[in-house]
Amino acid sequence: MSYPLLKSTIKSNWVIGIIILAVMFMYLAIILSMYDPEGNEALNALLATLPQELVKAMGYDTIETNLIGFVSSYYYGFIVILFPMIYSIIVANRLIAKHVDSGSMAYLLSTPNTRFTIVTTQAIYLLMSIAVIFTFITILGITIAQWLFAGELHVRAFIQMNVSAMLLFFAISGICFFFSCLFNDTKNSLAFGAGIPVAFFIINLLANVSPTLDWLQYLTIFTLFQPSTIIGDTFPIMPNIILIVIACACYAGGILLFRSRDLPL
């Protein structure tokens, strides 16, 4: 790993990370503040005014009375999927494909760093930044919940949900990173690196809309993220193992491709 390159990459991408983290934190704070230990009739009445297909697509149709279930339904069913996906798509493309497309990769390769050092440093940054985002969300979520509703939050389940979400986006970012390493231009990198995760996202929304579309859940990686299982005191070991395997395969594949392929420099 190249520490100067890592430092430069952090300087180039930290603003995006801060924006995504700030938006996620804002939504988490709002959702936690909307929880009512006596019941959520007001929120349920609001949701009843919305199209039910939209409510189901966003995963807001499950009524939970405890805090961890409430957060699981209204935060981890949609917000935690959408914004880290946007982050993964943007940053993965910027780390490799954009450098090749703009010609700045020639400058990076003119340094003593090898291709392997460059690509592994970029991969480490992407994984590390996702881990940092979910670490902050975990800490901030526990802090706010304890402040507003002391003792109400099932802390272990909350931590487990964030670990599972982090592993999900290790896999999603791996897909984005693989295509960033595969293509020489941002157009194709984004066509596949963004197209596949977005397709998974849309399929996941459709699978939630109607029981007749349940079969679509087998066509999306987001099915491997199971917050409802976690709040039932069961940590989904096998789905998390599959996510780790996908992440390792995609990152390793991207690194190997970048090392061996011809670059238009």
Image (spheres, rainbow, N blue to C red):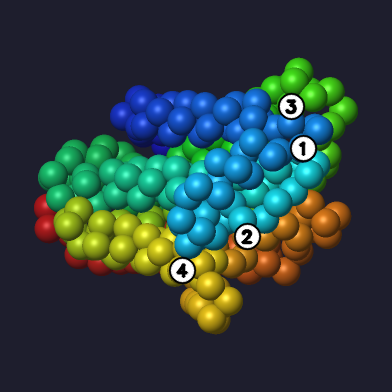
Q: Earlier in the sequence, mark 2 or mark 4?
A: 4
Disc 3 is placed on an element classified as helix
**What residue appears at the point 57 percent right and 28 percent down from the top-left corner?**
30
At which x and y percent is residue 151?
87, 28
Disc 1 or 4, which lies upstream in sequence?
Answer: 1
Q: CA distance from mark 3 to mark 4?
A: 31 Å
Horizontal relation, residue 147 to residue 108: left or right = right
- In the rendered image, the vertical position of residue 9 relative to residue 249, given as above or below: above
Q: Looking at numbered disc 1 in the image, what kind of residue is underneath it?
A: Gly
Q: Do tag 1 and tag 2 residues touch (Cβ < 8 Å)?
A: no
Q: Amino acid at mark 3?
A: Ala
Which label number is shown at residue 225? Answer: 2
Between disc 1 and disc 4, the foreground one is: 1
Q: Position of residue 261 (x, y in %)?
A: 25, 66
Q: Where does label 1 land, which residue?
A: 39
Instruction: Kindly identify which residue carries mark 4.
Output: 206
Q: CA distance from mark 3 to mark 2?
A: 23 Å
Tell me the crowding category of disc 1: few under 14, some 14 to 19, or many 20 or more residues within 10 angstroms, Cα based.
few
Marked residue nearer the N-terminal end (3 or 1): 1
The residue pinned by badge 3 equals 145
Alpha-carbon span between mark 1 and mark 4: 29 Å
Q: Dot 3: few (<14), some (14–19), or many (≥20) neighbours within 10 Å?
A: many
Q: Nearer the viewer, mark 3 or mark 1?
A: 1
Q: CA distance from mark 3 to mark 1?
A: 17 Å
Q: CA distance from mark 2 to mark 4?
A: 16 Å
